[in-house]
Amino acid sequence: MAALTGLVVLALVGASACDDADGPDEPGPTTTPDGLTTPGSELELGQPAVVPTSEGDGVAELTIERVDAGTAQDLQQLGVTDFSEFGGRAPTLYLLRLQIDWVSGARPVLLDAKHVNLWSGDELVDPLPPEVLGATSPCATGGFDDSAGPGASIDSCMAFVQASDAEPADRITFSSGADGGYWPPDDAELTWPLP
C-alpha cells in the first residue's frame, strides 16, 4: 500500500531578529494549563495530541500515525461492493492509522466520526461504520480491554471512502462538543494537514 503521509511544520511564533543580549524568542505554548493540546493547533502526522476523552473526565494521547491508500481487495474485505453511490466506479479508500494512549481518568472513547474526521476541501469524507472494521480486516480496530487502565495503549484504524473523481483528502481534524474545548465553529479543532 502506498503511504499518503507527509509532514507539515507546526506553526509556531517565528524568531525575530535580535541581538545576543535579548536571546532567542520562546515559542508559544503548545498545551493548555491542564496539559491538553492547545485548541486550534496544527500538528504533523505522527505528532501526538493530548485531548479529552468523550466520556467523563478522561484524557488520552491521540497520534495520527499515517493515512494509507486502500486497494480494491481492501474495499471487498470491508464489504464495499456496491459502487452505485460513487457513480458506478470503485471509490477511493483511505485507511487512517492511529494510536491511542490512555493518560488518565475515564476510558477513552473517541474513535468515531463525531470526533476524528477526514476532509477534502469543505467536504467531509464518508467514514465506514465501525461495525465493518473487525480485528482481522485491513483496517483492524478495537478498544481497550476491560482490565486496561491509564498507561495502556492501542493501535487502531478508521476507514473513509469518497468518489474516485473527488479532490483528494487534505486534512484530518479532531473536534469535540461546544464545552469540550475543540469546537469547530470557534476554529478550535486540531488539524493534521496531508500532502
Image (spheres, rainbow, N blue to C red):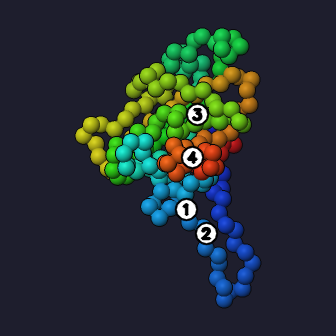
The numbered disc on residue 188 is: none
In the image, residue 140 sits, relative to residue 99, either above or below, namely above
Cα distance between the residues tagged 4 and 2:
24 Å
Q: Amino acid at mark 2?
A: Pro
Mark 2 or mark 3: which comes first in sequence?
A: 2
User: Which residue is depicted at the point 35% across and 52% down?
Assistant: 104
* Residue hosting label 1: 30
Disc 3 versus disc 1: nearer the observer: 1
Q: Nearer the viewer, residue 51 or 168?
A: 51
Q: Residue 25: percent from the left, percent from the top?
A: 65, 76
* Residue hosting label 3: 68
Task: Please tell me how crowded label 3 is: few (under 14), some (14-19), or many (20+) other residues with Cα within 10 Å.
Answer: some
Q: Amino acid at mark 1?
A: Thr
**79 with respect to 15 (left or right):** left
Q: Residue 16: percent from the left, percent from the top?
A: 73, 75
Residue 1 at least partly seen: no
Mark 3 or mark 1: which comes first in sequence?
A: 1
Give the total number of marks visible in the rendering: 4
What is the secondary structure assignment of the residue under circle 4?
loop
Q: Nearer the viewer, residue 108 or 165?
A: 108
* Residue hosting label 4: 183
Q: Amino acid at mark 4?
A: Trp
What is the secondary structure assignment of the residue under circle 2?
loop
Residue 193 at least partly seen: yes
